[in-house]
Image: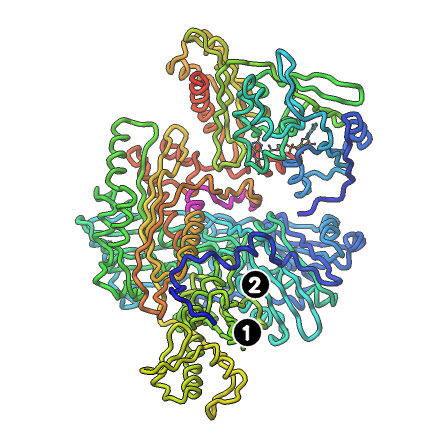
């Protein structure tokens, strides 16, 4: 066992797992081939809202290679209802959520029938032979309209499209004063409505499921973020004894929250595999993914901010309508609620009220997407701070500074009732301003305005904080979430001195294998290369709450530390016994135990062997040094940062070009700066994409018109600017690693920074809002006062929508 | 997604290919680079029973000098067109437009002829072909015929090619020494044009002696901006003259409305981009 000289934590290690991932040397779920494996294909509703009057599968069953074709009726008795683990209020309304629609479809893309055949091609061919009759029902799409009294209903049985209304009021909670009073008394009040468009997570690896239904032991491989939750929920939904289910998430190619789900297809693959007694695989196409995997965001936000003339903010009122889509999925109702604690952001509001109504529409269900609730909150507060600054005629950065929590005020309990443990907004902002050249850009902006330059310059600011490290179990309980927020880790000390670390987190691109190895290497004084990280298989990692909400390091990483400490504690006992000294005299550094004041030493490796062979252990000490630990955080962690964006807006075409982007993030202690950098870059790309490119668009019939990547625009590297990134480092005080979480930071801050910069560029032309995504047409129309809507038809030429619309490339 | 089943043949001569297409009838499809056809097959938007793979037709690749014009093989890839010295010298507009097509992967597979035969109104090579007065050489069971670009593009995704005809070559008259520019407007780099303008001009003694202007995605087929051309010819190559001529850009166009741009905005873009394209071409 080699001792590591310089600490591993803090090293920019290349990721151990990358060689395997990027050379295709791994096996994704779809690469699995089991003997006798069959293939499932799913028929999806082309209409958004209809009664199913008949489904005829007789012709499909006769097709070559087909074993079975099933409808919702066939599975009605066994499919149960897909789980929703977050009933946000006692009286929340939740319709039954069948995996296969039984007599009604509620969104275009909903599964209505399935075929199992010997090959995937035969299964797909047979779908065309299924005959479904639909009787159209009125389609509910618009959020504002859906909550009106005379609105058509998605689920008539519920009597309303409102699922639940959730309120936080600082006056009632005792965390602040009454916001209505604050607004009534205010010298300045600014009100705005912002729209968070619907987004599609667009993970790179489409979803795939393989089920091997051996009697007494069902194994499911799934491209999921949440193998542990999935196993629990499958047992709960289908009544299969949990000990007989094994879920494996092999290498998973991205998720962004989109694979934090228990999907209809997972349930269906399991049911048909069990019914046929054969392994079955289902893999989706990209379009299928876009039509049926859960979407993200989709809110209407009415924001009122009040302030004194001197710029001091006095109140914040948030009224949200959040689109749930047609059903409540795993954590759908809770996503907007995660934002409830973040609208007040880094500012000292004395009064705050948050009201959110969750609404059903005939669209794909929404659920977690990178940031989940927090990007929405940050967007709204950072946009309205700019609007307030414009109203007051002050520099938007100065307005923020005037109102934020100063570094000497931490720990600080906010008006939303959270206690921020640490932070230094001044330091991050100062560094960002310096890197950005804030003053020079402002000067150039003035000049371009004066010259009437057709290309105008805008400066966009976003500060942010977020609650990461989901989550203290007690808090989750108080929010009526069905599960806890702890994480588990176990360490196996192998007799050759190598280490197996088992984590309950479930990486799907984040680099846990590398970062966890670094943590263990430092803690135990073993070589980085000697640590193997095991995850994602419920037979190997039997306890875990999986990966989402920037929780893996801040919660799971801490569990790793605690488990390592337990290994060391026991190793110390054994070492003291073997060296025949008192335990208190034994010190441990860099993988070696030594006796204080003597030259006697014993390497951890030798202690491991001694503990393993157990020839000579103290009385009552069990053989082996393996240990496990579960960590339940006391508090969230609160990363923060300041992002600055300069954009050039071509006022003749409305085209927006990001000229420079600077972010200074404070994610606490950093285990691996390279991984942090990667997370920031990816996050920025996704956040900028919300501001400029991505939007799930439905036509008036509820058909998703952006169901290919030719129509749903994702930027590539060439579309994005150079990112100037830097960090300040204020350690979290809420965990022994001092870490905070970085998975969502870039996504959260970049969207408002970009939109603020666009509005800033053309504010003098009378623009105070551009709806996202800020397409050239929207920007041009905003400048020229043409506020009319944007057509929902896909590209008339280019892209595949066009080919679709005209019936093929003839 | 998985395409429906189809038969596949890979002929090595134009004759064989034409015979295979004729035998396959309406349900046969030629495949060049497959960059547009394969997505369509995978989404089952087209369900041909026979695919005739043209990649073995080596006689259809490369650029040839025919004196007054260039002859470009239909199977010449975008990548080859971009780098071809003859094209660069005598039909620079084509190089510049091809530079903006898709991404490197697609440009290595997609072909010049495939793009023209596909006739996507948002495709970037149609307007240059029209502006350059290119002539399409088509081979069918009864021999070959030549169709000028102005008659080749019939409607959205529809050309003058019969189902059993192949586009074999494109003749492009040389415009040696002309200035050229392709001004493309799109939202992400690898995407098709929302609107684009292809311009080639010959400036002589400070005056615009000749001008060719073609518009991409301003109608079901590429559009020749004749009004702009007329307004430019004989004018001094000045900003004022170009700005004034560009106001006629959308004359005769029939722009579509879609999620990226409605007709009004497209017409506006056509004017702005024409001004920019001609300005750049004049100084190129
Ligand atoms: C991601 C992506 C981005 C793209 N972006 C752009 C872009 O920005 N601009 C742009 O212009 N294009 C773009 N394209 C399209 C690309 O240029 C294609 O290569 C082109 O449209 C078709 O060329 P191909 O050789 O691949 O033809 P194929 O896909 O093989 O064929 C297309 C059609 O033409 C027919 N056909 C092909 N060759 C012949 C022939 N010789 N005779 C008769 N019929 C024939 C086929 O039967 C088929 O119907 C993009 C494509 C992709 C995949």
**Image height check: is A497 above or below A76?**
below
Of residues A574 and A172, the one nearer the viewer is A574
Of residues A91 and A588, the one nearer the viewer is A588
Q: Measuring 75% from the left and 56% from the top, which residue is drawn there? A: A117
Magenta-drawn segment: A688-705
Of residues A150 and A499, the one nearer the viewer is A499
Label 1 neighbourhood size at 10 Å, few (<14), some (14-19), many (20+)? some
Residue B113: in magenta span: no
Q: Main secondary structure of the magenta part?
A: loop
Instruction: Determine whether, in the image, residue A395 is placed left or right of residue A530.
Output: left
Give the farthest residue toward the front: A599
CA distance separating discs 2 and 1: 18 Å
Of residues A257 and A552, the one nearer the viewer is A552
Give the farthest residue toward the bottom: A619
Q: Quadrant of ligand 1?
A: top right
**Image height check: is B181 above or below A74?**
above
Q: Measuring 30% from the left and 36% from the top, which residue is drawn there? A: A763
Tag on residue B240? none
Give the farthest residue toward the right: B23
Location of mark 2 (residue): A262
For the image shown, how many numbered marks are present on the structure? 2
Location of mark 1 (residue): A542
Where residue A172 appears, as percent x and y from the top left, is 29, 67
Label 2 neighbourhood size at 10 Å, few (<14), some (14-19), many (20+)? many
The chain letter for the residue carrying disc 1 is A
Which quadrant: the C terminus of chain B? top left
Residue A702: in magenta span: yes
Asked if badge 2 and badge 1 are on a common chain, one would say yes
The answer to whether one can see residue A779 in this image is yes
Where residue A772 appears, as percent x and y from the top left, is 42, 43
Where residue A417 appears, as percent x and y from the top left, is 30, 66
């Amino acid at each position: 066992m080699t001792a590591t000289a310089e600490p591993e934590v803090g090293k920019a290690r290349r990721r151990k797992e990358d060689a395997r991932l990027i050379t295709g040397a791994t096996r994704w779920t779809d690469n699995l081939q089991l003997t006798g494996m069959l293939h499932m294909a799913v028929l999806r509703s082309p209409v958004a809202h209809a009664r199913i009057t008949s489904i005829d599968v007789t012709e499909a069953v006769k097709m070559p290679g087909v074993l079975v074709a099933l409808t919702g009726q066939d599975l009605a008795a066994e499919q149960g209802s897909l789980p929703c683990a977050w009933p946000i209020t006692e009286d929340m309304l939740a319709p039954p959520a069948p995996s296969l629609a039984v007599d009604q479809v509620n969104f275009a893309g909903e599964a209505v029938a399935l075929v199992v055949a010997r090959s995937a091609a035969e299964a797909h061919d047979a779908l065309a032979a299924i005959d479904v009759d639909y009787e159209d029902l009125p389609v509910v799409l618009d959020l504002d309209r859906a909550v009106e009294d005379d609105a058509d209903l998605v689920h008539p049985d519920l009597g309303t499209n409102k699922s639940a209304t959730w309120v936080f009021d600082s006056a009632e909670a005792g965390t602040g004063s009454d916001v209505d009073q604050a607004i009534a008394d205010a010298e300045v009040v600014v009100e705005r409505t912002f729209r968070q468009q619907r987004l599609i997570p667009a993970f790179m690896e489409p979803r795939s499921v393989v089920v091997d239904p051996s009697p007494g032991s069902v194994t499911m491989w799934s491209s999921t973020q949440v193998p542990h939750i999935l196993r629990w929920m499958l047992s709960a939904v289908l009544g299969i004894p949990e000990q007989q289910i094994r879920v494996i998430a092999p290498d998973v190619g991205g998720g962004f929250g989109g694979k934090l789900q228990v999907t209809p297809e997972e349930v269906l693959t399991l049911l048909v595999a069990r019914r046929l007694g054969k392994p079955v695989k289902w893999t989706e196409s990209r379009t299928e993914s876009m039509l049926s995997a859960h979407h993200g965001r989709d809110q209407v936000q009415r924001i009122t901010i009040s302030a004194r003339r001197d710029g001091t903010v006095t109140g914040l009122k948030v009224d949200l309508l959040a689109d749930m889509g047609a059903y409540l999925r795993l954590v759908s109702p809770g996503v907007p609620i995660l934002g409830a604690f973040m609208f007040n952001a880094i500012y000292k509001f004395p009064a705050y009220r948050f009201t959110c109504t969750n609404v059903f529409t005939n669209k794909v269900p929404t659920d977690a997407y990178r940031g989940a609730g927090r990007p929405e909150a940050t967007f709204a507060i950072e946009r309205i701070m700019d609007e307030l600054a414009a109203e007051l005629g002050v520099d938007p950065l100065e307005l923020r500074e005037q109102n934020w929590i100063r570094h000497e005020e931490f720990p600080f309990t906010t008006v939303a009732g959270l206690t921020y443990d640490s932070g230094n907004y001044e330091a991050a902002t100062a560094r960002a301003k310096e890197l950005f050249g804030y003053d020079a850009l402002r000067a150039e902006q003035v000049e371009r305005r004066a010259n009437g330059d057709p290309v105008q310059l805008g400066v966009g600011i976003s500060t942010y904080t977020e609650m990461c490290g989901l989550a203290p179990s007690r808090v989750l309980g108080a929010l009526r979430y069905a599960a806890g927020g702890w994480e588990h880790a176990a360490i196996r000390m192998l007799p050759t001195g190598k280490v197996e670390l088992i984590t309950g987190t479930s990486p799907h691109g984040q680099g846990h294998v590398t970062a966890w190895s670094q943590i263990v290497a430092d803690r135990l004084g073993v070589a980085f290369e000697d640590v193997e990280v095991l995850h994602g298989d419920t037979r190997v990692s039997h306890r875990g709450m999986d990966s989402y909400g920037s929780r893996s390091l801040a919660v799971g990483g801490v569990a790793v530390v605690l488990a390592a400490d337990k290994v060391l504690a026991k190793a110390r006992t054994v070492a003291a016994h073997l060296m025949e000294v008192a335990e208190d005299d034994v010190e441990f550094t860099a993988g070696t135990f030594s006796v204080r004041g003597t030259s006697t030493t014993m390497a951890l490796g030798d202690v491991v062997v001694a503990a393993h062979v157990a020839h000579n252990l103290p009385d009552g000490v069990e053989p082996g040094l393996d240990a496990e630990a579960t960590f339940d955080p006391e508090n969230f962690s609160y990363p923060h940062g300041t992002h600055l964006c300069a954009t050039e807006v071509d006022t003749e075409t409305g085209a927006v070009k990001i000229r420079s982007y600077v972010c200074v993030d404070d994610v606490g202690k950093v285990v691996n700066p390279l991984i942090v950098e990667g997370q920031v870059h990816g996050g920025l790309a996704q956040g900028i994409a919300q501001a400029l490119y991505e939007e799930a668009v439905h036509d008036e019939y509820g058909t998703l018109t952006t169901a290919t990547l030719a129509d749903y625009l994702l930027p590539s590297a060439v579309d994005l600017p150079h990112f100037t990134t830097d960090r300040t480092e204020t350690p979290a005080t809420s965990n022994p690693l001092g870490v905070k979480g970085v998975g969502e930071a870039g996504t959260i801050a970049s969207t408002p920074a970009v939109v603020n910069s666009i509005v800033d560029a053309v504010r003098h032309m009378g623009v105070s809002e551009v709806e996202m995504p800020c397409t050239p047409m929207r920007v041009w129309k905003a400048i020229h006062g043409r506020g009319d809507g944007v057509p929902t038809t896909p590209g008339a030429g280019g892209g595949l929508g066009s080919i679709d619309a005209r019936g093929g490339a003839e | 997604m998985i395409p429906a089943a189809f038969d596949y043949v890979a002929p090595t001569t134009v004759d064989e290919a034409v015979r295979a297409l004729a035998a396959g009838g309406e349900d046969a499809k030629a495949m060049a680079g497959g960059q547009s056809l394969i997505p369509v097959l995978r989404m089952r938007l087209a369900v041909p029973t026979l695919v005739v793979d043209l990649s073995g037709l080596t006689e259809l690749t490369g650029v040839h000098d025919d004196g007054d014009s260039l002859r470009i093989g239909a199977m010449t890839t975008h990548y080859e067109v971009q780098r071809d010295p003859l094209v660069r010298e005598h039909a620079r507009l084509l190089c510049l437009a091809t530079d903006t097509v898709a991404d490197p992967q697609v440009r290595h597979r997609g072909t010049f002829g495939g793009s023209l035969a596909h006739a996507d109104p948002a495709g970037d090579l149609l307007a240059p072909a029209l502006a350059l007065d290119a002539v399409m050489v088509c081979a069918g069971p009864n021999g070959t015929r030549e169709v000028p670009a102005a008659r080749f593009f019939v409607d959205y995704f529809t050309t003058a090619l019969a189902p059993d005809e192949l586009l074999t070559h494109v003749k492009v008259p040389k415009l040696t020494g002309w200035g050229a520019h392709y001004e493309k407007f799109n939202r992400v780099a690898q995407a098709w044009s929302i609107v684009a303008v292809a311009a080639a001009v010959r400036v002589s003694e400070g005056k615009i002696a000749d001008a060719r202007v073609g518009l991409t995605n301003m109608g079901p087929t590429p559009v020749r901006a004749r009004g702009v051309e007329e307004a430019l010819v004989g004018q001094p190559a000045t900003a004022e003259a170009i700005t004034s001529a560009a106001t006629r850009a959308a004359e005769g166009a029939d722009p579509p409305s879609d999620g990226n741009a409605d007709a009004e905005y497209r017409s506006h873009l056509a004017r702005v981009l024409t001004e920019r394209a001609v300005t750049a071409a004049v100084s190129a």
